[in-house]
Image (cartoon, rainbow, N blue to C red):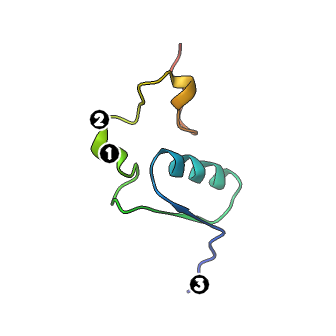
Amino acid sequence: MTHKTDVVVTGGGQAGLAAGYHLRRRRLAFVILDAQAAPGGSWRHRWHSPHLLSPAEHSWLPGRSRPAG
């Protein structure tokens, strides 16, 4: 069985997940590679949630609804 991959994303942190969101919207075949077993990369070991300390308009993840404010 052969799988076609258009893009390989290195790192499953915030930037890698955002890249995956946009690649999926463009219907490209992609894979996200990360040393961690679960999405979020090393983020999961440094912070308690996927929210940054900066205002939401500067740190939101694509595909997630923005907080009202």
Q: CA distance from mark 1 to mark 3?
A: 33 Å
Residue 3 is marked as none
Looking at the rendered image, the disc whose residue lies closer to the viewer, 3 or 2, is: 2
Q: Residue at x 36, y 63 (%)?
A: 35
Q: Earlier in the sequence, mark 3 or mark 2?
A: 3
Q: Residue at x 66, y 69 (%)?
A: 6
Total residue callouts? 3
Spot occupied by residue 34 in the image (x, y as percentages of width and height) = 42, 61
Q: Residue at x 41, y 25 (%)?
A: 53
Q: Nearer the viewer, residue 3 or 31?
A: 31
Q: Which residue is mark 3?
A: 2
Residue type highlighted by circle 1: Arg
Q: Circle 3 — which element?
A: loop
**Crowdedness near tag 1: few (<14), some (14–19) or many (≥20) residues, C-alpha within 10 Å:** some
Q: Which residue is mark 2?
A: 48
Q: Does residue 30 appear to the left or right of 32 in the view shown?
A: right
Spot occupied by residue 63 in the image (x, y as percentages of width and height) = 57, 39
Q: CA distance from mark 3 to mark 2?
A: 39 Å
Q: Earlier in the sequence, mark 1 or mark 3?
A: 3
Residue type highlighted by circle 3: Thr
Where 8 sits versus 12, above or below?
A: below
**Crowdedness near tag 2: few (<14), some (14–19) or many (≥20) residues, C-alpha within 10 Å:** few
Q: Circle 2 — which element?
A: loop
Q: Which residue is mark 1?
A: 44
Looking at the rendered image, the disc whose residue lies closer to the viewer, 1 or 3, is: 1
| Proximity of marks 3 and 2: CB atoms separated by less than 8 Å | no
Q: Does residue 55 appear to the left or right of 51 in the view shown?
A: right
Q: CA distance from mark 1 to mark 2?
A: 7 Å
